[in-house]
Structures are given as structure tokens and as C-alpha cells.
Image (tube, grey):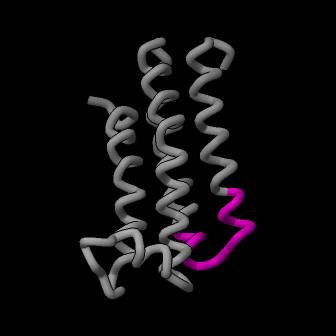
Amino acid sequence: MPFALWSILLASFLPLLWTALAKAGAPYDNHQPRVVLAAATGWRQRANWAQQNAWEAFPSYAAAMLLAWMMKVPADRLDLLAVVYVLLRLGHGLCYLSDKATLRSLCWLGGYAVVVLLFVSAAGLF
């Protein structure tokens, strides 16, 4: 299976990574797991925000990648776009953690541009 399709699974793990970081070392009550995250501050709060944004970004990426694959966009292009997307989304989360707002927004914009390129490629326009 090509990396492009594996990237969907990788992208689905990113929210879990940010959640794990947000919860790491924090007092945790499994009966009320969202209470801990809602009360988080500092880098843990930003990790939770990164987690929320990663969940929000995932569906459009997965749909775009699957559509591009079904429309037989060349695999090398899909693999390249997949690598770029995963790296940008990883960078997005790391920028959230380190409170680099402008760079974080650029990573978000780049990731969204990849989604648009996947749709445009699926349509045969790129």
C-alpha cells in the first residue's frame, strides 16, 4: 500500500499524540477526562487546542486523499502531498506547543493548501 494511504492513518494519530501530551503528568480522572483538559493551562492547554484542531482538519484530508486516489492521481504526487501534509500538521502541533502563533498559522495554511491541491488534482486541474 502506498504511503499516501498510510498517511491517513498517520494523520489520525496526531490528535492522539497531542492529547497524550496534554494529559501527561496532569491529575487525571477517567470518570471526567474532559474536565482535566478544560482546566489545562500553558503548554498543556495548547496541546489540547492542537488536538482539537487536528481532529477538525482530519476529515477533509482523509476525504481529499481518498478522492484523489479513486480518481487515479499519480501515486508519486499523492505520496509527496501526503509527506508534506503530515509534516505540516506535525509542525502545526509543535508550533502550538511552543506558542509560535504565526508559524502555526502558516503550517495550518500549508496543510489546507495540500487538501485543496488533492481536490484540484482529483478534478484533473493540476
Residue at 44 percent across and 74 percent down: it is 37
103 left or right of 67? right
Q: Which residues are magenta?
A: 94-106
- Asked if 65 appears above or below 8 in the picture, the reply is above
Q: Residue at x 53, y 35 (%)?
A: 60
Q: Is residue 9 visible?
A: yes
- Direction front: furthest residue: 31
Observer-nearest of 23 and 75: 23
Q: Quadrant of residue 70?
A: top left
Location of the C terminus (image quadrant):
top right
Horizontal side of 124 relative to 22 (left or right) equals: right
Q: Residue at x 33, y 43 (%)?
A: 9
Q: Main secondary structure of the magenta part?
A: helix
The x, y position of residue 28, in whole percent, is 30, 81
93 sits left or right of 110 in the view: left
Closer-to-camera residue (27/92): 27
Instruction: Determine if residue 84 is in view.
Output: no
The N terminus - image quarter: top left
Residue 43, x across and y down, in percent: 53, 82
User: Can you tell which quarter of the image residue 8 is in?
Assistant: top left
Location of residue 83 in the rendering, given as x and y in whole percent from the top left corner: 47, 45
Vertical position of residue 98 compared to residue 20: above or below? below
Q: How many marks?
A: 0
Q: Please check the rendered image and state whether residue 40 is part of the magenta-colored stretch, yes or no.
A: no
Give the residue drawn at x 60%, y 23%. 119
- Looking at the image, is 87 positioned above or below residue 43? above
| Residue 51 in picture, x, y percent from top left | 47, 61
